[in-house]
Amino acid sequence: MISKNDDLVRIDREQKDSKHSQKTLRAERDAAVKELKAMKRNYRNCAAVCFANNKTILAEFKSIIPNNKSRKTTTPTEPETTTNG
């Protein structure tokens, strides 16, 4: 009976440790992503200044990933026609 209880305590402790490790790793990952985004923004701003007169080179620094912002799409509606008859 004691060994079962010890096993449960050990497993619970391991689970808590892995949750803590997961939080720590996520924080490190988020910090690295934030740093990379800042570097990317700096490179693009620098390229915009350096290659302002050369559009072909400047185009190489544009993102290939589409923007995540939601766009409002308006579908043209046809005017309703009434018929006499």
Image (tube, rainbow, N blue to C red):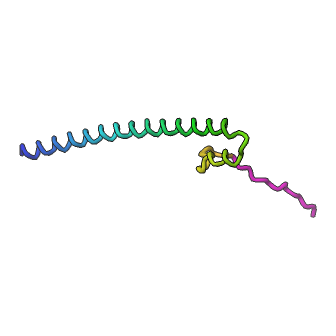
Residue 64 picture location, percent across and down: 60, 50
Q: Position of 83 compared to 44: left or right?
A: right
Q: Please name whichever residue, 33 or 40, is drawn nearer the observer in this view of the structure.
A: 40
Magenta span covers which residues?
72-85
Q: Residue at x 13, y 45 (%)?
A: 7
Magenta-drawn stretch contains 48: no
Q: Residue at x 25, y 39 (%)?
A: 17
Residue 12 picture location, percent across and down: 21, 41
Q: Please name whichever residue, 7 or 81, is drawn nearer the observer in this view of the structure.
A: 7
Give the mark count.
0
The image quadrant that residue 26 belongs to is top left
Vertical placement of 50 versus 62: above or below? above
| Main secondary structure type of the part rendered in magenta | loop
Q: Please name whichever residue, 11 or 5, is drawn nearer the observer in this view of the structure.
A: 11
Q: Position of 77 compared to 23: left or right?
A: right
Extreme residue toward the right, this view: 84
Q: Residue at x 30, y 37 (%)?
A: 20
Q: Quadrant of the C terminus?
A: bottom right
Residue 55 picture location, percent across and down: 71, 46
Extreme residue toward the bottom, this view: 85
